[in-house]
Amino acid sequence: MLLAIPYLLIANVCIELVEDGAPGWLHLIVLWAIWSMLKMLWIRPVSAVLLMRDCVRESVTARRERANLSSEAADAERRAAVDTIAVRWGVRTQAPTRRQPPARIVPPHAITANRTASLLTASRAAT
Protein backbone atom coordinates (compact mmCIF):
# COMPACT_ATOMS: atom_id res chain seq x y z
CA MET A 1 0.00 0.00 0.00
CA LEU A 2 2.92 2.31 0.60
CA LEU A 3 4.00 1.80 -3.00
CA ALA A 4 0.82 3.54 -4.16
CA ILE A 5 1.76 6.87 -2.54
CA PRO A 6 4.50 7.86 -5.03
CA TYR A 7 2.17 7.17 -7.96
CA LEU A 8 -0.47 9.38 -6.34
CA LEU A 9 2.10 12.15 -5.90
CA ILE A 10 3.20 11.85 -9.56
CA ALA A 11 -0.42 12.13 -10.69
CA ASN A 12 -1.01 15.12 -8.43
CA VAL A 13 2.08 16.97 -9.69
CA CYS A 14 1.16 16.33 -13.33
CA ILE A 15 -2.40 17.56 -12.79
CA GLU A 16 -1.14 20.77 -11.21
CA LEU A 17 1.32 21.27 -14.09
CA VAL A 18 -1.46 20.81 -16.67
CA GLU A 19 -3.68 23.31 -14.84
CA ASP A 20 -0.81 25.83 -14.87
CA GLY A 21 -0.43 25.53 -18.65
CA ALA A 22 1.83 22.50 -19.25
CA PRO A 23 1.32 20.35 -22.38
CA GLY A 24 -1.74 18.10 -22.53
CA TRP A 25 0.26 14.88 -22.97
CA LEU A 26 0.88 14.97 -19.23
CA HIS A 27 -2.65 13.59 -18.91
CA LEU A 28 -1.23 10.28 -20.18
CA ILE A 29 1.25 10.26 -17.31
CA VAL A 30 -1.64 10.97 -14.92
CA LEU A 31 -3.55 7.97 -16.30
CA TRP A 32 -0.46 5.76 -16.02
CA ALA A 33 0.19 6.89 -12.44
CA ILE A 34 -3.41 6.32 -11.36
CA TRP A 35 -3.47 2.87 -13.01
CA SER A 36 -0.23 1.88 -11.26
CA MET A 37 -1.55 3.23 -7.96
CA LEU A 38 -4.67 1.07 -8.27
CA LYS A 39 -2.53 -2.00 -9.02
CA MET A 40 -0.44 -1.34 -5.92
CA LEU A 41 -3.56 -0.98 -3.79
CA TRP A 42 -4.85 -4.37 -4.99
CA ILE A 43 -1.58 -6.18 -4.25
CA ARG A 44 -2.13 -6.32 -0.50
CA PRO A 45 -5.59 -7.97 -0.34
CA VAL A 46 -4.82 -10.36 -3.19
CA SER A 47 -1.49 -11.41 -1.73
CA ALA A 48 -3.11 -11.89 1.70
CA VAL A 49 -5.69 -14.24 0.20
CA LEU A 50 -2.99 -16.17 -1.71
CA LEU A 51 -0.85 -16.42 1.43
CA MET A 52 -3.76 -17.79 3.49
CA ARG A 53 -4.52 -20.33 0.75
CA ASP A 54 -0.92 -21.54 0.72
CA CYS A 55 -0.82 -21.78 4.51
CA VAL A 56 -3.97 -23.91 4.51
CA ARG A 57 -2.53 -26.17 1.80
CA GLU A 58 0.70 -26.62 3.73
CA SER A 59 -1.11 -27.50 6.96
CA VAL A 60 -3.34 -30.02 5.17
CA THR A 61 -0.32 -31.60 3.49
CA ALA A 62 1.58 -31.80 6.79
CA ARG A 63 -1.43 -33.37 8.50
CA ARG A 64 -1.75 -35.98 5.74
CA GLU A 65 1.96 -36.78 5.88
CA ARG A 66 1.80 -37.26 9.65
CA ALA A 67 -1.17 -39.59 9.23
CA ASN A 68 0.64 -41.56 6.52
CA LEU A 69 3.80 -41.86 8.60
CA SER A 70 1.91 -43.22 11.58
CA SER A 71 0.01 -45.73 9.43
CA GLU A 72 3.22 -46.78 7.67
CA ALA A 73 4.91 -47.29 11.03
CA ALA A 74 2.04 -49.47 12.20
CA ASP A 75 2.20 -51.49 8.96
CA ALA A 76 5.95 -51.97 9.33
CA GLU A 77 5.47 -53.09 12.93
CA ARG A 78 2.85 -55.63 11.84
CA ARG A 79 5.08 -56.92 9.04
CA ALA A 80 8.00 -57.26 11.44
CA ALA A 81 5.83 -59.26 13.85
CA VAL A 82 4.66 -61.57 11.04
CA ASP A 83 8.24 -62.04 9.84
CA THR A 84 9.50 -62.96 13.30
CA ILE A 85 6.70 -65.49 13.71
CA ALA A 86 7.44 -66.93 10.29
CA VAL A 87 11.16 -67.19 11.06
CA ARG A 88 10.40 -69.05 14.30
CA TRP A 89 8.24 -71.56 12.48
CA GLY A 90 10.62 -71.86 9.54
CA VAL A 91 8.16 -70.47 7.01
CA ARG A 92 9.41 -68.24 4.27
CA THR A 93 7.02 -65.33 3.85
CA GLN A 94 7.86 -63.90 0.43
CA ALA A 95 10.72 -64.47 -1.90
CA PRO A 96 12.51 -61.31 -2.84
CA THR A 97 11.54 -60.20 -6.29
CA ARG A 98 14.09 -58.90 -8.73
CA ARG A 99 13.31 -56.29 -11.28
CA GLN A 100 13.93 -57.14 -14.88
CA PRO A 101 16.70 -55.09 -16.46
CA PRO A 102 15.56 -52.72 -19.16
CA ALA A 103 15.68 -53.98 -22.72
CA ARG A 104 18.86 -53.19 -24.59
CA ILE A 105 18.40 -50.33 -26.96
CA VAL A 106 20.16 -50.90 -30.26
CA PRO A 107 20.90 -47.87 -32.43
CA PRO A 108 19.62 -48.04 -36.03
CA HIS A 109 23.09 -48.10 -37.58
CA ALA A 110 23.95 -51.22 -35.57
CA ILE A 111 20.88 -53.00 -36.90
CA THR A 112 21.90 -52.16 -40.45
CA ALA A 113 25.48 -53.34 -39.83
CA ASN A 114 24.26 -56.62 -38.32
CA ARG A 115 21.85 -57.20 -41.18
CA THR A 116 24.57 -56.46 -43.76
CA ALA A 117 26.99 -58.84 -42.03
CA SER A 118 24.37 -61.59 -41.92
CA LEU A 119 23.56 -61.11 -45.62
CA LEU A 120 27.25 -61.30 -46.52
CA THR A 121 27.74 -64.51 -44.58
CA ALA A 122 24.61 -66.00 -46.15
CA SER A 123 25.77 -65.13 -49.67
CA ARG A 124 29.25 -66.57 -49.02
CA ALA A 125 27.73 -69.77 -47.72
CA ALA A 126 25.53 -70.09 -50.79
CA THR A 127 28.48 -69.80 -53.20
Image (tube, helix red, strand yellow):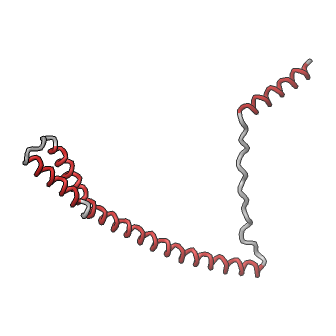
Say whether residue 45 is left or right of residue 51. left
Is 115 above or below relative to 96? above
Query: In this view of the protein, which residue sits in the foreground, 112 or 47?
Result: 47
Query: Split into 4 quadrants, where in the image is the N terminus?
Result: bottom left
- In the rendered image, residue 90, in percent from the top left (x then y), is placed at 78, 77
Query: Split into 4 quadrants, where in the image is the C terminus?
Result: top right
Is 124 above or below relative to 22? above
Is 76 above or below relative to 104? below
Q: In percent of the image, x 70 and y 49: which residue is there? A: 102
The count of marks equals 0
Q: In percent of the image, x 19 and y 46: which residue is there? A: 29
Query: In this view of the protein, which residue sits in the foreground, 78 or 63?
Result: 63
Q: In percent of the image, x 50 and y 75: which residue is there? A: 66
Query: In this view of the protein, which residue sits in the foreground, 68 or 60?
Result: 60
Q: Quadrant of residue 72?
A: bottom right
Say whether residue 125 is left or right of residue 11. right
- In the rendered image, residue 32, in percent from the top left (x then y), is placed at 21, 48
Q: In percent of the image, x 59 and y 75: which residue is there? A: 75
Residue at the farthest top position: 127
